[in-house]
Image (tube, grey):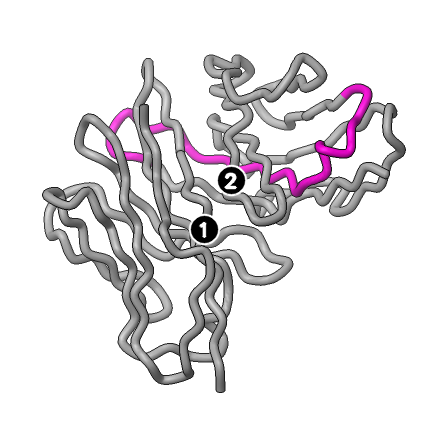
Amino acid sequence: AQSVTQPDIHITVSEGASLELRCNYSYGATPYLFWYVQSPGQGLQLLLKYFSGDTLVQGIKGFEAEFKRSQSSFNLRKPSVHWSDAAEYFCAVGAKERGYNKLIFGAGTRLAVHP
Amino acid sequence: GAGVSQSPSNKVTEKGKDVELRCDPISGHTALYWYRQSLGQGLEFLIYFQGNSAPDKSGLPSDRFSAERTGGSVSTLTIQRTQQEDSAVYLCASSSSGQWGFPEAFFGQGTRLTVV
């Protein structure tokens, strides 16, 4: 069965510091991988996605993620965090089942940013 | 519309009452998802619609939960005889349904349900 694990429930970083949020997935076939961000009181917004090709993908707001098949990981990174990045981040895997698309989410990582 | 619209944005109901949550997807999107987000939990998949049919109802937590979609557009999630554990944010998403790749899912703002 497909699953997504985000090992870190809460992370706190200082503004300007680098960030890495971890994501591991379980899926039998080539995965479609996503990172979404949910700011307080907001819906989910897509940050970036990986389908195939270059394993390092760039997203919005200066985020990037690297797909590592050998580690079943898709970690999200940002070189320098801004206070406005404080939010909850969700990793997701897209699975194709019986002709339709199913999006499975991890439990999320809540990011706090200290000034 | 411009985005996925959900109503109401907030709903407080008494235990045992029925509630209906509405989702208006992006025009032209044939795929529609419902998720539940409980405090401190991830997004729990509830149900998926392709057009008006629901090939996957596996995520519905109990027979008190049902959903329908009419005209390939608006969807309603109904919870009968609500319980306190039903308190959560219910999120709806829609996407185009492409055979190739994986179309982006666009989310609404959610309905926060509180059962008292």
The residue under the point 15% across, 42% down is A52
Residue A87 location in percent, x, y? 50, 64
Q: Which element carries disc 1, helix, strand or loop?
A: loop
Q: Which residue is at a point 28% across and 65% down the rendered structure image?
A: A77
Residue at horizontal 36 percent and vertical 84 percent from the top: A16
Q: Is residue A70 above or below residue B57?
A: below
The residue at which mark 2 appears reads as: B43
Label 1 lies in what chain? A
- Queried whether the magenta region covers residue B14, the answer comes back as no
**Location of residue B30 in the rendering, given as x and y in whole percent from the top left corner:** 48, 26
- Which residues lie in the magenta part? B80-102
Chain that bears disc 2: B
Q: Amino acid at mark 1?
A: Gly
* Left or right for A19, reference B72: left
Q: Which mark is on residue A14?
A: none
Q: Quadrant of the C terminus of chain B?
A: top right
As helix, strand or loop, the secondary structure at mark 2 comes to strand
Q: Are marks 2 and 1 in contact (CB under 8 Å)?
A: yes
Q: Position of residue A29 (x, y in %)?
A: 18, 27
Residue occupied by mark 1:
A108
Q: Are there few (<14), some (14-19), or many (20+) residues within 10 Å of tag 1?
A: many
